[in-house]
Structure formats: structure tokens, C-alpha cells
Image (cartoon, rainbow, N blue to C red):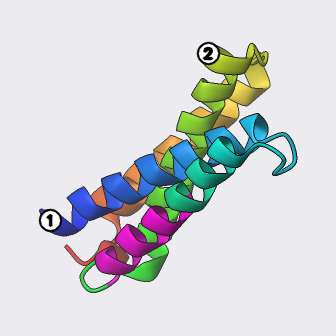
């Protein structure tokens, strides 16, 4: 279960880093820039730990899919960015794909 915890931490760190990209205003504000660098650094570190156990395709699918959904939620909640029906359906399809990979694919290493 530890590889999945590391993957969850990688996802959260990536979402934090990406969230602060907008606040950095083109890398002109030092504290948000620091949050971006630390967030991405931690994200890649934790992602690399997962690759000792979880296949790279599965880890990346979960990392990018969950990150996409979470950063979209941050954009909606923190920055007032609109979500229309196609965006919500598309994110649902991405999550469905990640679930299918993890629950049914032999590539997931189950």
C-alpha cells in the first residue's frame, strides 16, 4: 500500500505546484514560485518512488488523471473558472479509464 500512498502524495504535490503557477504571475512573485518548485520537486520524487512497484503506465495514468480532475476543481473553486457539461463528461471518462486500468487490466500488476 505504500506505493499508492507515495502516488497520492505525488498527485497532491503536483496539484499544489500547478495551483501556484497562476499565482506566480509568470514567475514574478517569489513565494508562489517557491511553492511551484517545491510542489513539482516533491511530486516527481514521490512519483519516482511509486515506479519501484507500480508499472510506469499505470502510475502515470493515475497521476495525470487524478491531477487533471483535482486541478480543474482548484481552478473552479479558487479562480472561478467555469466547467461546462463536456468538461465534466470528459473528466468522468478519464476517471473511468483510470479505474478500468486499475481494476481490470493485467498491466496494473495485480
Q: Nearest the camera: 106 or 44?
A: 44
Outermost front residue: 30
Residue 53 left/right relative to 64: left
Residue 101, position as x, y percentages in the image: 40, 62
Res 106 visible: no
Q: Residue at label 1?
A: 2
Residue 89, position as x, y percentages in the image: 66, 28
Outermost bottom residue: 52
Name the image quarter holding the N terminus: bottom left
Q: Quadrant of residue 22?
A: top right
Tell me whether circle 1 and circle 2 mark residues in contact (CB < 8 Å). Answer: no
The answer to whether residue 82 is above or below residue 91 is above
For label 2, the crowd category at 10 Å Cα-Cα, with few meaning under 14, some 14 to 19 and many 20 or more, is few
Q: Quadrant of residue 56?
A: bottom left
Residue drawn at the location 39% of the way across and 79% of the way down: 48
Name the image quarter holding the C terminus: bottom left
Residue 65 left/right relative to 83: left
Q: Residue at label 2?
A: 77
Assign the magenta stretch its main secondary structure: helix
Residue bounds of the magenta highlight: 40-51
Amino acid at each position: 500500500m505504500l506505493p499508492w500512498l507515495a502516488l497520492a502524495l505525488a498527485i497532491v504535490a503536483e496539484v499544489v505546484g500547478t495551483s501556484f503557477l497562476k499565482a506566480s504571475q509568470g514567475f514574478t512573485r517569489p513565494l508562489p514560485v517557491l511553492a511551484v518548485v517545491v510542489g513539482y520537486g516533491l511530486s516527481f520524487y514521490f512519483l519516482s518512488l511509486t515506479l519501484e512497484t507500480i508499472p510506469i503506465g499505470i502510475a502515470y495514468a493515475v497521476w495525470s488523471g487524478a491531477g487533471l480532475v483535482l486541478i480543474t476543481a482548484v481552478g473552479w473553486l479558487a479562480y472561478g473558472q467555469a466547467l461546462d457539461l463536456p468538461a465534466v463528461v470528459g473528466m468522468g471518462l478519464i476517471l473511468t479509464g483510470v479505474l478500468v486500468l486499475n481494476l481490470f487490466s493485467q498491466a496494473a500488476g495485480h
